[in-house]
Image (cartoon, rainbow, N blue to C red):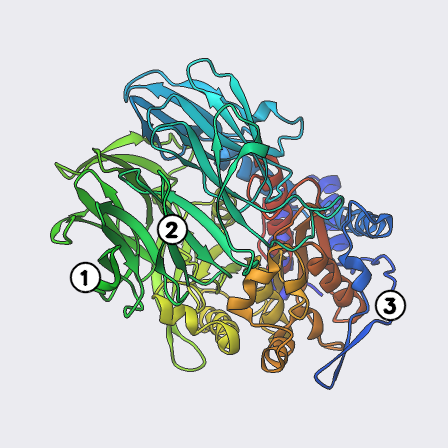
């Protein structure tokens, strides 16, 4: 049954319609309230004995690649048919799509990169599927198109990945991402002519793109070429760093760094400021626990700097043998230190750990810019190379700044600033004068002043104070509570900082409230905040999110039957877990590309990296902890669940779609109430990165129309 307070707003809308239109609206609303007839899903008899527990996995067959196994493809087609038919009945779907399209239709710029006298930046004129890469001759020069990925595929699903100009701006190194996959194809373009050089590198994944200072070639990271048919689901092992000299075939590339004795290590290359070294940062999982190795560019023995894989180390700059890093060694919220590579164990502190979390640093000219998070809001400061304070960079109160990249030879840098109600503005900063000026500011089709953003703190189950951001339209009647969308992530040391989203603003613009809870597991308060939400502390994440929902109801921001929850990837796991634990608390749930089978996540693609946050299913203590909250294994038959719309994509090779397939099949089988429990599977899309604008809008309109239906948000 729909929430009781849904009927009154719909009746008011119907009074303004013609009788025929009113009957059509009533019929659509009635159809949306009926539980769909789910396709029959074959239920197997697979059972895995683990540590004395018989673990049933009846939908193991749904783990197969949808593009290879016709049986899985047929299941997806049947599910999409039912879901599409249901979504077509939702009265708010077209209205959301229209408003999201309007809000997306503004000029957007990416952060510029200066190389030589040229400036490179991305721009989307509003509704282009993919942003276009431009280049300017000089700061005030006329921009010209260098790469337009919208010409690469008819469906707009082939995207420009990472890119990097050579030091002199003569060449552009760029990568191509097709259909949302994590695999990249790397190419080189002559900037003056706009023509590709013919250099092409394949099987690149989880890689930066680093030019040699002399522009003779570049460094990149790759995996061995997978066996035929295994590229989508194969485990990622034996990562290695290579150097490619321009004008030579990939087969001639020089191996710089590999660890065949430790095949699970990943390696990233950074060319030092003086160009004399290639710094290799190595890690095994997602934790910021790194090893550091220096390779002299002109040859010579590698220099190990850090080999304990215990702490975060982020290269900032170097002068000769003196290197500067951000590290959380002996400083959970991070500090700035330097070391001499001849005696790397002896650290010199430049900037001590503070109450706010140091999340990044970069050298620009003869200054270092420090980026901090204070209660999940951005702060930025200028210090000298020796760490002595110079000035603060003025930012708005609630928002997020990013960028601040640059060169030791140039005092100019760029940074972006955005908030929940304000799209990204790009600023140019002169680190000598400390003055900022606008480089690019969008012209908007709405007034950000119509929306309010506030930060509050709520107490979790164990008394921990957790921040949340609340976004709503000014003048909203708050006397009876409003349909609310609560978003969370809670993992992998990733901070949920203010960001502009046209799709979420559409929810607010239609009268809903949008809330982000900065739950434990993220990096908002440094290492301790992350540690408090992973491994055997993972339940804290779920307790925090549940407490956020209870707080919103207790404070009258939303009401019982008005609360929807959303999360993607690790956030999809979050949504699946809390729905199992507190199905009574939520009216609707939107788990996207979620990790739903916690006992087999490490068997596919990037899943093996996640053991840092989740633990090892093969270890008994971890197994029992994972089994206790795994969304797929803890669906409670006979309970009344909220309406659930699962979303995933057929080419997601980060969190393979089998997670969502199996979870949905079990949810539909378990008989957990009369509300719909559906899955929407996108084609030629991956984990999210590179998704074209039209697909973003279409999916978001479906999700939020679904949430609106079950929270009582009347959308016109």
- The Cα–Cα distance between marks 3 and 1, rounded to whole angstroms, is 60 Å
Q: Tell me if residue 550 comes above or below residue 684 in the rendering.
A: below
Q: Which residue is mark 2?
A: 302
- The Cα–Cα distance between marks 2 and 1, rounded to whole angstroms, is 23 Å
Q: Residues within 10 Å of mark 3 (few under 14, many from 20)?
A: few
Nearer-the-camera pick, 13 or 163: 163
Of the numbered discs 2 and 3, the one sitting upstream in the chain is: 3
- The spot of residue 644 in percent (x, y) is 67, 61
- Left or right, 270 with reference to 151: left
Q: Nearer the viewer, mark 2 or mark 1?
A: 2
Nearer-the-camera pick, 347 or 556: 347
- The spot of residue 177 in percent (x, y) is 58, 36
Secondary element at image label 1: strand
Q: Looking at the image, which residue is at 31% across and 68% down?
A: 332
Of the numbered discs 3 and 1, the one sitting upstream in the chain is: 3
Q: Where is residue 571, by image quadrant?
A: bottom right
Q: Which residue is mark 1?
A: 348
Q: Where is residue 352, by image quadrant?
A: bottom left
Secondary element at image label 3: loop
Of the numbered discs 2 and 1, the one sitting upstream in the chain is: 2
- Left or right, 449 with reference to 284: left
The quarter in which the N terminus is drawn is bottom right
Q: Looking at the image, which residue is at 56% across and 35% down?
A: 693
Nearer-the-camera pick, 540 or 164: 164
Is residue 531 visible in the rendered structure shown here?
yes
Q: Which residue is mark 3?
A: 44
């Amino acid at each position: 049954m729909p929430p009781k307070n849904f009927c009154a707003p719909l009746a008011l809308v119907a009074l303004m319609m013609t009788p025929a239109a009113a009957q059509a609206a009533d019929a659509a609303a009635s159809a949306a309230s009926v539980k769909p007839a789910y396709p029959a899903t074959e239920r197997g008899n697979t059972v895995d004995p683990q540590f004395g527990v018989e673990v049933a996995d009846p939908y193991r067959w749904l783990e197969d690649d949808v593009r290879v196994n016709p049986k899985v493809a047929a299941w997806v087609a049947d599910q999409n048919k039912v879901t599409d038919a249901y979504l077509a009945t939702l009265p708010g779907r077209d209205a959301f799509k229209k408003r999201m399209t309007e809000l997306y239709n503004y000029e957007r710029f990416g952060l510029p990169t200066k190389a030589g006298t040229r400036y490179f930046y991305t721009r989307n004129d509003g509704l282009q599927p993919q942003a276009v890469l431009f280049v300017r001759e000089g700061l005030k020069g006329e921009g010209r198109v260098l790469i337009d990925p919208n010409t690469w595929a008819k469906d707009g699903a082939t995207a420009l990945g990472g890119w990097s100009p050579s030091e002199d701006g003569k060449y552009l190194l760029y990568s191509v991402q097709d259909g949302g996959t994590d695999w990249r194809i790397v190419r080189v373009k002559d900037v003056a002519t706009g023509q590709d050089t013919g250099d092409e590198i394949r099987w690149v994944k989880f890689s930066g793109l680093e030019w040699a200072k002399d522009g003779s070639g570049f460094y990149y990271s790759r995996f061995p070429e997978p066996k035929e048919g295994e590229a989508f689901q194969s485990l990622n092992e034996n990562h290695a760093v290579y150097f490619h000299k321009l004008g030579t075939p990939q087969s001639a590339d020089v191996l710089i760094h590999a660890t065949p004795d430790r095949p699970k290590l990943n390696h990233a290359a950074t060319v030092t400021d003086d160009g004399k070294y290639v710094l290799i940062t190595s890690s095994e999982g997602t934790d910021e626990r790194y090893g550091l190795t220096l390779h002299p560019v002109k040859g010579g023995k590698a220099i190990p700097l850090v080999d304990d894989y215990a702490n975060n180390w982020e290269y900032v700059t170097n002068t000769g043998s003196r290197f500067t890093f951000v590290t959380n060694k002996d400083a959970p919220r991070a500090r700035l230190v330097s070391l001499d590579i001849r005696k790397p164990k002896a650290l010199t502190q430049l900037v001590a750990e503070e109450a706010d979390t140091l999340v990044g640093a970069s050298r620009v000219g003869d200054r270092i810019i420090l980026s901090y998070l204070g209660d999940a809001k951005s702060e930025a400061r200028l210090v000298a190379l020796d760490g002595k304070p110079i000035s603060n960079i003025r930012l708005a109160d609630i928002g997020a700044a990013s960028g601040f990249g640059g060169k030791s030879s140039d005092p100019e840098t760029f940074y972006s600033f955005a908030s929940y109600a304000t799209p990204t503005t790009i600023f140019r900063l002169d680190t000598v004068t400390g003055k900022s000026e606008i480089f690019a500011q969008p012209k908007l089709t709405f007034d950000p002043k119509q929306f309010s953003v506030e930060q509050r703190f709520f107490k979790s189950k164990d008394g921990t104070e957790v921040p949340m951001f609340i976004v709503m339209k000014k003048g909203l009647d708050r006397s009876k509570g409003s349909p609310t969308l609560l978003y969370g992530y809670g993992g992998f040391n990733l901070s949920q900082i203010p960001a502009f989203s046209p799709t979420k603003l559409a929810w607010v613009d239609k009268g809903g409230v949008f809330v982000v809870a900065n739950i434990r597991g993220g990096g908002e308060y440094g290492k301790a905040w992350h540690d408090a939400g992973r491994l055997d502390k993972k339940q804290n994440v779920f307790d925090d999110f549940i407490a956020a929902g209870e707080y919103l109801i207790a404070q009258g921001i939303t009401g019982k039957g008005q609360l929807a929850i959303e999360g993607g990837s690790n956030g999809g796991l979050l949504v699946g877990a809390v729905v199992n634990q507190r199905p009574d608390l939520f009216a609707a749930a939107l788990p996207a590309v979620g990790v739903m089978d916690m006992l087999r996540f490490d068997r596919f693609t990037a899943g093996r990296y996640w053991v840092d946050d989740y633990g090892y299913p093969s270890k008994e203590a971890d197994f029992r902890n994972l089994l206790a909250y795994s969304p797929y294994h803890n669906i409670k038959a006979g309970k009344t669940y909220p309406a659930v719309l699962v979303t995933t994509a057929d080419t997601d090779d980060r969190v393979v779609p089998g997670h969502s397939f199996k979870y949905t099949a079990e949810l539909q089988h378990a008989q957990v109430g009369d509300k719909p429990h559906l899955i929407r599977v996108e084609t030629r899309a991956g984990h999210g990165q590179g998704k074209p604008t039209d697909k973003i809008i279409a999916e978001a309109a479906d999700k939020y129309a679904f949430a609106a239906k079950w929270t009582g948000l009347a959308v016109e």
